Image: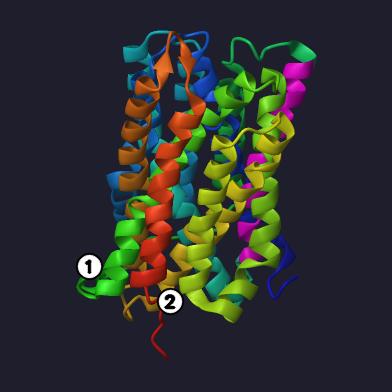
Amino acid sequence: MFGMELGLYLKLSAMMFLEFAVWGAWYPVLATRLLGPLKFSGKQTGWIYATLPLGCIFMPLVAGQVADRWINTEFILAGAHLAGTLLLFIAAWKRKFTSLFGVLLVYALFYAATLPLVNSLMFRHLEANGASAKSPYIFMWAPIAWALAGYFLTGWRWVFKTGEEGRDCLVLAAVLSVVMAVVCGALLPETRPLATAGASALGMLKDSSFLIFIIISMIAPGMMQFYFLGTAQFMQDNGIASKNVPAAMAIAQATQAVATLALLGLLVDKIGYKWTLTLGAASWLVMYVIYVMPRPAAVIAAGQAFHGLAYVFFIIAGQMFAGAVAPKGAEASMQALIFTAQSGIALFLGTQFAGIVMDKCRVEGRFQWSKLWMVPGVVMLVCVLALFFLFKGTVPTP
C-alpha cells in the first residue's frame, strides 16, 4: 500500500492518529474552563498554555539523545504516555492555578518528549521500506485525529451535558493517552538506538535568508496562541453554544487534513517554498481580519479553515523546507532546530504575549474582541511582508 507494507502503514498511522488526538482533545478548548468556571485571568491562562511550549524548548533534545543512545523509541513513547495518563487525570480535578500549572508542566515535559520521536520513528521505518515520499499518507492522520477528538467531545457534551464545567477535555485526553501507550508498547516496530547522534545545523544561521525564516518561525507560530487562548470564548461570546465550540474549531483540522494530502506537495512543486510559506502566514492574517470585522457566527466558524491552511503551508511546509536545505549529515539537528523555534520558543513567547494582551483588552469581565484580534493581525502582516521581501526560499540543487 502506497509503496509500503499494509501492516506498517496501519501501525504508523495509528501512532500518528493517537499522538495528535491526545493533544487535540484538550488544547483547543481548555481555555474555556480556565477563563470560565475556574475564573483564571488571561495571564494565568497564558501560563497554563505555556507549559507545553516550555517543555518543547528542551525536552525533544533530551528525548532524542536517549532514543539515539540508550532506549528503544517505542518504549520511550509508551512510558511517556503512561505517565501522561496519570497526570491528565490529576489535572482534570485541579481548580487552583498553582497546582494545575505544576501538574500540566510535568505533563508537558513528558508529552513534548514524544512529539519528535513520533516523526523520527516514522521516517526511519519509511526509509527502511523505501517509502519516504509517502509520509503525507501518515501525516494526514494528525489533523484528522485533532478534528475527530473535537467532534467526539462535542457529541459527549450533547449527551452528558459536561460542557459547562469543561474538565471532560482532560479526561478524554487521558483515556486516549493510555490507548497510545498500549499501541506504542505492543504494536510499533522495534526501533533500537542509533550508534551516533545527529550533527549540528546552527551554521545555517549565517545565511541571511535562512535566518529570516528562523526568526519568523519564532514569531508567526506564536500568534497561534491568540487563536488557542481566545477563540473558544470568542465563539461563545458571539452566539456559538459551548457544546458546539469543539466541532466548530475542528473545521481547521478538517481543512488541514485535506490540504496536507491534496495541496501541500503540489504547491511546493509549483510555486516553491517562498510563496508556500508566505501563503501560510497570509492565511493566519486573513483569519484575524475576519475576527476583527463585524460578522455572524457562521463566518467565524468558516474562518477556522484559514487556521488549517496556515498550519499546513507554514508549519509543515517550514519543516519540509528545513529538511530540504539541511547540510548533509545535519538533517536531525535541523529538524530539532525548527521544532524548537516553532513549537518551543514561538509558542512560549506567544502564550505570554497573548495572555498580557487579553488582560489589557478585558473590561469589566468582557473582552474587547476587535481590539484584541488586531494585535496578532498586525504581527502577521509584518511576517507576511518580511517573507515577501526578505526570504528567498531557495533549495540547493543536489
| Image quadrant where residue 185 sits | top right
Q: Residue furthest right?
A: 159
> Residue at image x 71%, y 61%?
7
Give the magenta range. 136-158
Picture disc at residue 324: 2
> Depth check: 61 or 180 in front?
61
> Depth check: 259 or 5 in front?
259
Q: Residue furthest bottom?
A: 398
Amino acid type of the residue that numbered disc 2 sits on in the rendered structure: Ala
Picture disc at residue 213: none
Disc 1: which residue = 202
Q: Secondary structure at mark 1?
A: helix
Decide: is 299 above or below 119: above
Q: Is residue 153 magenta?
A: yes
Q: Position of residue 393 (x, y in %)?
A: 41, 76
The answer to whether residue 82 is seen in the rendering is no
Q: Position of residue 48 (x, y in %)?
A: 38, 25
Quadrant containing the N terminus in the rendered view:
bottom right
Bin the neighbour count of mark 2 within 10 Å (Cα to Cα): few under 14, some 14-19, many 20 and up.
some
> Residue at image x 25%, y 73%?
208
> Residue at image x 50%, y 31%?
370
| Image quadrant where residue 163 sits | top right
Q: Position of residue 193 (x, y in %)?
A: 37, 61
